[in-house]
Amino acid sequence: MKQAIGIAVYPALVESARRGTVRTALRTTLKTTIGTTLRTTLRTTIGALAASALLSACGGGAATTENPITQAPDPGNSVYTGPAPGDDGVFQFQQEFWSKARTSERCGACHNESVAQVPMFVRNDDVNLAYDAALTVVDINQPSQSHLVTKVGGGHNCWVDDPNVCAEIMTTWIENWLGGNVAAGGRQIVLQPPAPVDPGASKNFPEDPSAFRALIHEPILAEYCAACHSSESPNAQAPFIADPNVETAYAAAKSKINLDTPANSRLVIRLRNEFHNCWNVGCAQSAQIMEDAIAAFSDGITPTTVDPALVTSKALRLVDGTIASGGNRYEEAQIALYEFKTGSGTVAYDTSGVDPAIDLNLTPDVTWFGGWGITLSGGKAQGSTTASAKLFDILQESGEFSIEAWVIPANVTQEEARIVSYSAGETARNFTLQQTLYDYDFKLRTNETSLNGDPALSTPSADEVLQASLQHVVATYDPVNGRSIYVNGDLVTNTDPVPGGTLVDWQDTFAFVLGNEASGTYPWLGTLRMVAVHRRALTEEQIVQNFDVGVGEKFFMLFDISEIIQAAEQSSFILFEVQQFDSWAYLFDKPHFTTLDGSTPEDIPLEGLRIGMNGQEVRIGQTYATMTANLSASEFGELGQPLSIQGAVLGLEKGPEADEFFLTFDRLADASYDRPEDPVAVITPTDLDAQSRIGLRSFDEIGASYAAITGVDPTAPEVYLTFQELRQSLPAVEDINTFLSSHQVAIAQLAIQYCDAMVESNPTAMFPGFDFDGADEFATNRDAFVNPLIDRVMGTGLDSQPARAEVYAELASHQSGGGARPDNLIDRLRAGGSDTRAIAKGVCAAMLGSAVTLVQ
């Protein structure tokens, strides 16, 4: 039994066609008018009703009908000369599936009329017969479960090194064929109940790393792997399984060790199957030594058994769930897609299904990020110029496009750091999305911009849109509206100052690159979770649709509670959306109560839901421990009855293929667990070190103080640009212990800029009687400048501040010779030949940049 999220039931005719049970009769009938109507209905139903089979159903679609992305036939295959497609459905099949699968390196070498290997779904003599054959091996309700997909996913004639990539591409072709008329352009998700499995005993990693240190870390990892997999290595590469800090190494190694089957440990496979840096005894013996060490470590661990008193759901692993990733994404115009699902190796595959695939080669400074992604630490992911020309061919023809990415910048101090680029080097590009401090920049070559894509469109610096956190960024271009940048679903740029132009000046010899310039000279530091290129400027509705979907490897996990609530059959579940949050944790989110058989249970009490892993309740992250709810079908929405809007982050232990999860309940229906009181932790407070009573003004406070003292508008170009440039070098926190010499340098530069602006504005109202154009005004009239300046800087006259006389007395006590006035600087500047304005600026900057304006 399975449930399609937001799906209308397909007509019996479609199901029969899928199974191939009515094809012969239907073909005969098609010779009549009635048959023609039936055939048209069949093909129309497959295309049109597939819309309701998508999670999105009707959101975010464009108003216009997209033409298919046509592709030239493979030169090694014959040109099709058979009968024309019988209707739009066959034409859609020909364009989106047949033309791509028929090439000789894919399915065309066997499944055709010449070799006659059935099913002949890519036969060249009649595309209509090929369509009939394809229907027998395609799951219309759930394309990802089609026999074609599972076959290539199992390694059957996959045309790249990773069979999962072939499965992804095959799924995309089938979805594009079946969903060619779907405005929302989304993916279909169907819920299927997992096999009922009781939570079992499980070996868990002990908290104490002593056994790991003695058996694995010191004799093997530290000895043979520390040259790279250590944080202290000059060639440091994650994971730090050989770090000298055994706690760090233990945490990094856990997900690489299989306690149940040591031979399946990633540490063993890397040596035995992938020949990764084997030591002097050879790879086979190195792998055996590693396996024996892990086995000895595992043998010393007593399995954890589930407390029989607990009220538990059935158990399942993350990979037993229904894949939820990408559901409801708008992908109708997608021509390049990188979801980084491979997780290992040196290639990031383009799984858009649009040929040629722009597969990206990863340099050594690029590592895989858990839960789909790559982390760039100075390297790059680059495609060949030949494959990259796909962007030139398609986008120059469309005249518009979008760059979409889920990014995690490593910091906000990078400048001109290339995130996504189609370029040749530092001075020539077709387009680039880059980071400059807190800004995203969009460079684009048109007939209205330079060959380097300048001027760039940037997000407003004052808004600090870019942050070192997970963000969804979309840069769009069309010749009418020009360029736009959206962040997390919101338009964050103003109108493009450059008129919309054409892409006529683009070059087809550039390379598509992630995380750097093609020349390697402008690296971006951070993590990419997903990157896509679309041949259309996405609408705001489509962008929000993709943002709402999120990113990463997600699963719908159905925890069976049918036995507990005494349901008639396996049909009642607590559903979670779960993903591997990063390389170290899982995220459980959006819990729902749901049924898959249409049953309508009502008013079932639930109290105290907790998550268990590997035979025991997780110790931390139990967000739902205080939950109370009545499970009722009358509250069902799209996924069922929502139970909470909160999420829970749980530490990864064995990895997504081995960690076994289950739920426990303090009460569910008539079953209950008498949970003992948690012991109250007694915390003895520790006295902190004495803290300073004075602090620093932060960068914004310093800027505001300077503006108030000098009367200069802080948005004036002469000071605003300087403030933005120096902002990263000014104090960010109030703790005086964080003050650095670089802070003082930046303060002095900003003070000089404000004083220059003040003096050049001729502030006669602020300094009455002082002539800034006088030849030697400071010789006889310095009081007219110094006194008002000290009053403004010190705030003299305020109850909280000293009087001017006290200020002069304090200054005099620190001057050599005991003078009563702060005249040393003025006299030195006069002796050096400085004019009146230059002296005024110097005196102002000395006061403005002093501790008076910095300390609070």
Image: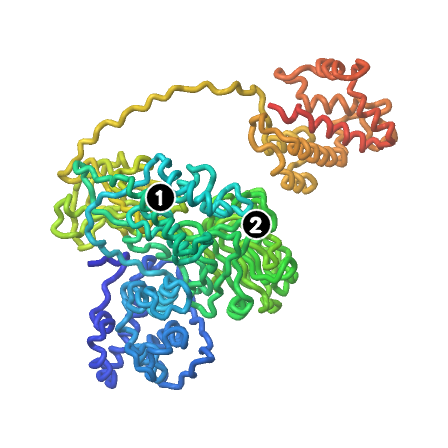
Residue at 69 percent across and 29 percent down: it is 849
Residue 555 placed where, x, y %? Answer: 32, 52
Question: Residue 89, percent across and down?
Answer: 33, 75
Give whichever of 379, 209 is nearer the camera. 209
Q: Amino acid at mark 1?
A: Leu
Give the structural element (helix, strand or loop) at label 1: loop
Give the number of the mark in front: 1 or 2.
Answer: 1
Q: CA distance from mark 1 to mark 2?
A: 32 Å
Left/right placement of residue 72 relative to residue 151 reads right
Q: Identify the residue shown where x is 36% and y is 55%.
A: 325
Labels 1 & 2 near each other (Cβ < 8 A): no
Side (left or right) of 90 relative to 831 = left
Which image quadrant is residue 543 in?
bottom left
Point out which mark residue 571 bears: none
583 vs 272: above or below: above
Q: How is the image coloured?
A: rainbow
Instruction: Report the residue marked by disc 1.
Output: 652
Mark before the other along the chain sequence, 1 or 2:
2
| Horizontal side of residue 680 vs 352, given as left or right | left
| For residue 424, above or below residue 731 | below
Residue 299 occupies quadrant? top left
Q: Quadrant of residue 765?
A: top right
Q: Which of the pair 380/450 is nearer the observer? A: 380
The residue where tag 2 is placed is 435
| Kind of residue sitting beneath label 2 | Gln
Q: Position of residue 769 (x, y in %)?
A: 80, 25
Label tally: 2
Q: Is residue 494 visible?
A: no
- Disc 2: CA contacts within 10 A as few (<14), some (14-19) or many (>=20): many
Closer to us: 784 or 341:
341
> Which residue is nearer to you in this view: 114 or 840?
114
Counting other residues with Cα less than 10 Å from the Cα at mark 1, is it few (<14), some (14-19), or many (20 or more)? Answer: many
